[in-house]
Amino acid sequence: MSGGNLKIVNPADGSIVTELETDTPESIQENFECAARGQREWAKTTLGERKKILIRFDGLLQKGKEELAKILTSETGKPIRQSRGEIGAVSERIRFFTDNFEAVMRPETAHQAKGLEEKISFEPLGVIANISAWNYPYFVGANVFVPALLTGNAVLYKPSEYSTLTGLQIVKLMTRAGVPANAFIPVVGSGETGAEILRHPLAAVFFTGSHATGLKIAQAAAKRLMKVQLELGGKDPVYICEDVDVAAAAAAAAEGAFYNCGQSCCAIERLYVHEKIHSGFLDELLEAVQGMKVGDPTDPGTDIGPLTRARQIDVLKDQIEDAQKKGGKILCGGKPVSGKGNFFEPTVVSEASSVMSLMREESFGPVIGVQKVAGDEEALRLMNDTRFGLTAGVYTGDRKRAEKILSQADAGSVYWNCCDRVSPRLPWSGRKDSGLGLTLSRRGIAAFLQPKAWHLKN
Ligand code: NAD
């Protein structure tokens, strides 16, 4: 791997926003050594000091929200309203971490007897790598770098090559807030740059991205026996029962499937609809989807912008073609929008079934498959018929019924009458091919600490 240039492309029109110099093996080596020194110093700062700095960082994010949102939209195509929304909402996550990390780090007395004390203290892991995705760079980044820094780790932070400008802004504001430049260090580049980082003896790698890359990360981590945490993709199902307000459920499903152009790890990717309301639900779903405004992501009225990565267009085309061959019916959309940019028509496919790649592999775009089901048993069987396990949801007026189904859903997060939702207070984890380990919640803070067992005799 050698250094080079990274072109930042605007997915809405294909124009080059700017070019950045990428890191080289030599600069990564230097960054690693610098972070190792920086971590020792950073860990000596008081918890109160770190807390103040991270709260200041949040303040700077919120103050710069408008400009930061424009940058995010220019490199990912995320509709500007949603870019602003992400930066605004990351505040709640940062505050959760700053409010809770001290309690998680508090030493515990495990046993006390005459002449003997056993206690546990919690220490930072050391230098960690944060290799990140582009679809929610503030959310998925903050899940890692905020608790990592609060608990005294140093971070080599590699933003995705599709959201590097945002990553560099984050680093700039972190430094301005008071995090030493050698405790939070950006690494610029694509996959091979990420792989280069992992050649160093890091304490851990925290990764957000695709399952395919996650496997490579796990293999690289195994060679050095470093801790590995993976937040990967999903194929998240939602079951709509026959007792719902059909229009409201359809509107919620459309939002859950198409928000951020369907590029959310926990977007609804499969819809199972009770046969009693199936036809009416499709009508309402179509109305909701066709009411979404597709276009210029800088326009505050836009709901669906371009796909961030041009290559995803072929994935969607293949899934739709495969679905059609196997009996799927395209109710709307189905193809790329002609003209400049990576736009794809919001697409609804009915008569979908589990033999279609549309219902098996992550689409990560504005496409949803809908399958009719006879009842709860069939719905549950189909929901669990997947190699992924990130989230699963049920819409029904009956909480008991929802809880019965969701208790059997093999997913890290389950939703009753909601979807596409992440809370800082709850653990965020994927089962099966959706990941390893967890972020968020107090448990997600503990992931950045290692326990030390004290045996004290007098
Ligand atoms: P990706 O796997 O293509 O890339 C993720 C990161 O890994 C990037 O920074 C990339 O440069 C880096 N990378 C690529 N190859 C590497 C290698 N061999 N070694 C080290 N680093 C390497 O994923 P993406 O397109 O950025 O993100 C989309 C995926 O992320 C989707 O599958 C989505 O579901 C998933 N995701 C999951 C969550 C979650 O919380 N579970 C959140 C957001 C996104």
Image (cartoon, rainbow, N blue to C red):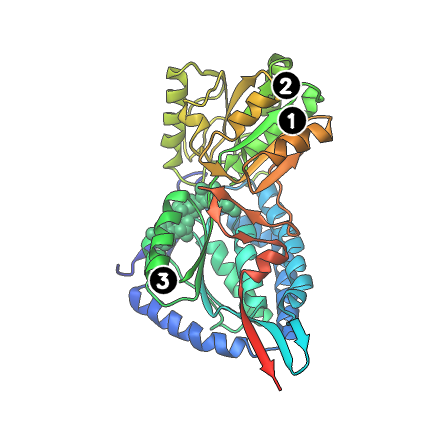
Picture quadrant of residue 179: bottom right
Q: Is residue 453 above or below residue 88?
A: below
Instruction: Of the two numbered discs 2 and 1 on the same chain, state the one appearing first in sequence.
Output: 1
Q: Which residue is mark 2?
A: 284
The amino acid type, in three-letter code, at marker 1 is Ala
Indicate yes or no: mark 3 CB to ligand 1 under 8 Å. Answer: yes
Front position in the image: 386 or 99? 386
Quadrant of the rendered structure where residue 127 is? bottom left
- Number of other residues with Cα within 10 Å of mark 2, as a class: few under 14, some 14 to 19, many 20 or more: some
Q: Is residue 130 above or below residue 9?
A: below
Question: Contact (CB < 8 A) between labels 2 and 1?
Answer: yes
Q: Quadrant of the C terminus?
A: bottom right
Rendered residue at 54%/37% (across/down): 410
Residue hosting label 1: 251
Kind of residue indicated by mark 2: Glu
Q: Nearer the viewer, residue 341 or 370?
A: 370
Task: Name the residue tied to disc 3.
Answer: 197
First of labels 3, 1 by sequence position? 3
Q: Is residue 246 left or right of residue 202?
A: right
Extreme residue in the left direction: 1
Instruction: Tell me the quarter of the image containing the N terminus.
Output: bottom left
| Residue 69 placement (x, y as % from top left) | 57, 50
